[in-house]
Image (spheres, rainbow, N blue to C red):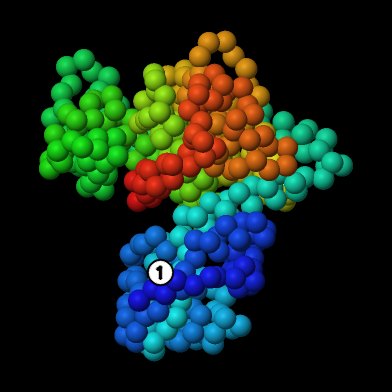
Amino acid sequence: MKKPATVPVSLLERLIPLRELDREALAALAREAEFEHVPARTMLFRKGGRDDWTRYLVSGSIVLADSDGTELTLTGKGNAAVVEQPLGLEQPFAATAVASTDSRLLRLPRARILTLLERARQSEADDADAEDDDDRREEAGSRLFYRLFEDLMAERLELPSMPEVAARVREAVAQPDTDAAEVAKIIQADPVVAAQVMKAANGLLFVGSRQVDNLNAAVIRLGLRHTREMVTAITMRQVFRSRNPLLNKRMVEQWMHSTLVAAIAAVLARKLPDFSPDRALLAGLVHDIGIVPMLAHAHEYPELAEDPGLLEATIREYRGQVGGLILRRWRFPDDMVAVPMAAERWYREHDGPGDYADLVLVAKLYALGPRGKRPGPAAVPAYGRLGLDRLRTEGGSILDEAREEIAAVQQLLLV
C-alpha cells in the first residue's frame, strides 16, 4: 500500500507541531517520511492503542470516533490542503480512526518527531533568558532553592516516592538469603512490570539465548541485582506523572527525554568494560528527577507562579541538587547520587576512570545534539575518561550503527 515518494520540506513546515523545527531538522525528518495509501473502511488505529507512527491526512476523509459516540470527520484535499493537526502524536490514542474514503496519508516516525521537538524546545529555553534578567533570576532562584531545601529538611515538602514494587524488590535483594523465586513473587503483583521484565530478559542483552517463558527464569537470567535495577527503571515512569494537565504535559516531555538518554547510556554501557547496561539505563532515567518536585510545588512559590521564565531558569540551576537529595532519600549509592548533580556540568573533572555520571552526561549530549554553547559529546572530558574515543567508527559517531538498538531499548520504557 505504501508508495515511496519524496516528501518536500515545504509540506512539513506547515504542519503542527513540526512548524516549530528549523529547516535542517525538517530536512532530516523528510528523509524518514513516507506516503501511505489506505482504502475506505480501513481502521488506522483503535482508542487506547499505540504504534510507532504519527500521521497527517493528505487527501480523503478520516473519522475519529470516541466511545461515547462523538465523531469528528477530517478531510484532506491534497498537498496544498493537508490537515495540519497530527494523528497519533499523543498516545495512547484518544479515539478510534477509520478511513471513510480511500485516503492518502503522510506518516513519520513518532519517536523521531518527539526527539527533534525536544531538542528545538531545549534550545529555545537556553536562549530565552535575556541578559538583563540574569541577576534577578539568579537571586530569586537561589531563594527558592533554599526554601525548597528548608521545607525538605522539615519534611514539609513531599518528594516523589519510589514505586512500591521497586521499593519491595530493592528491599528484598538487600537481604542475603533472598532467592529468585521470592523476587519473582513480588514482581508478579504488578502484571505490567512482570511483562516488561520478561521482555527485558528475552531482549537485546541476551541475543542468542533461548527464550525464557516464566518470570522466575527471567529473574534468574537477569540476576538479582540486574533485576533490581531493571524493575526500578521500568517503574520510574510512575514518578513522572501529575494530575494537573499542564504539569503532566511537561512531565511527559521530560520522561520522553529521559528515556532517550537512558537508552543511549545503556547502549554505550554495553560497549564499555566495567559498566552495567541496566544500571546505565536507571542512571539515565533519574538524571533529571529533581525536576519532578520543583514542578509539582512551583505553585506554592508566588515568584515562580508569576514568571514561567524564572521557573525554567530555577529548574535548570537547581534540579541537580534536588535530584541528589531525592536519590539520597531513596538510599541510592553515591555513584548514582552523583548522576543528577553532574548531568549538565559539561566540563566536569574528577580523578579516576569514567563513572556513571560521565556516561549519562555524554548520553545526554548525544540526545540533545550540539547547540549554542553546548559542546558535542566528543569535546567533553567525560568522553575520554570513558574511553569512547577508542570506539569511534569510520562513519563518525559510535552510535551511528546502534540506532535500532537505542530505539528498542527506549521502547521498553514507553509503557
The residue positioned 48% from the left and 28% from the top of the image is 391
x, y percent for residue 385 = 54, 19
Callout 1 environment at 10 Å: few (<14), some (14 to 19), or many (20+)?
some
Left or right: where 356 falls relative to 345: left
Q: Quadrant of residue 46?
A: bottom left
Between 254 and 281, the one nearer to me in the picture? 281
Q: In this view, does 318 lie above or below 174?
A: below
Q: In which quarter of the image is residue 92?
A: bottom left
Q: In this view, does 340 lie above or below 254?
A: above
Left or right: where 184 falls relative to 275: left
x, y percent for residue 20 = 65, 61
Left or right: where 156 falls relative to 379: left
Q: Can residue 52 be seen in this view?
A: yes
The residue positioned 48% from the left and 48% from the top of the image is 256
Q: Badge 1 is on which residue?
A: 94
Residue type highlighted by circle 1: Ala
Q: Is mark 1 on a helix, strand or loop?
A: loop
Q: Quadrant of residue 370?
A: top right
Quadrant of image for the N terminus: bottom left
The residue positioned 82% from the left and 45% from the top of the image is 130
